[in-house]
Image (spheres, rainbow, N blue to C red):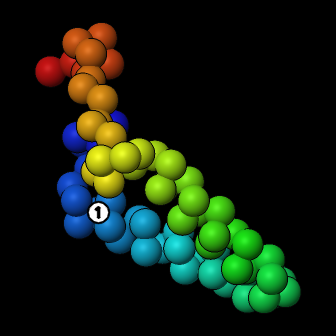
Amino acid sequence: MTDLVSDADCDACAREAAAAIEAVLDQRCPELKRAFWSAVAKHYRMSFGQSGQPPAAPRPTPEARPPA
């Protein structure tokens, strides 16, 4: 799926999602906001593992590709 969307579009979508999350968290208590972003950071640290590099993106299978 990510092969079908440009990096710029992915970045824009991520910025919009982060802004929407921030808007909701701003309506809650500061502790909840801090806990949420701490959990996100922990998730990414665990995903990157010892190497500090993100995991390799999965390659699409021939069945997953749209017809030409």
Say which residue appears at 27% left-offset and 37% top-offset.
56
- Nearest the viewer among 61 and 51 is 51
The part of the image, by quadrant, that contains residue 1 is top left
Q: Is residue 12 above or below residue 55?
A: below
Q: Can residue 24 be seen?
A: no
Which amino acid does the dot numbered 1 rest on?
A: Asp
Q: Can residue 44 be seen?
A: yes
Say which residue appears at 48% left-offset and 73% top-offset.
16
The part of the image, by quadrant, that contains residue 52 is bottom left
User: Which residue lies under the disc numbered 1?
Assistant: 9
- Label 1 element class: helix
Number of marks in picture: 1
- Residue 54 picture location, percent across and down: 32, 48
- Nearest the viewer among 43 and 28 is 43
Q: Kindly give the residue lying farthest to the left in the view shown.
A: 68
**In the image, is 56 to the left or to the right of 18?**
left
Q: Is residue 28 above or below residue 1?
A: below
Say which residue appears at 67% left-offset and 84% top-offset.
23
Q: Kindly give the residue lying farthest to the top in the view shown.
A: 63
- Residue 59 picture location, percent across and down: 24, 26
Q: Within 10 Å of the Cα at label 1, are there few (<14), some (14-19), or many (20+) other Cα atoms? A: few
Q: Quadrant of the C terminus?
A: top left
Q: Is residue 4 above or below residue 39?
A: above
Q: Kindly give the residue lying farthest to the right in the view shown.
A: 29
- Nearest the viewer among 40 and 14 is 40
**In the image, is 18 to the left or to the right of 39?**
left
Q: Is residue 66 above or below residue 11?
A: above
**In the image, is 11 to the left or to the right of 8?**
right
**In the image, is 52 to the left or to the right of 35?**
left
- Residue 41 picture location, percent across and down: 54, 65
Say which residue appears at 43% left-offset and 66% top-offset.
14
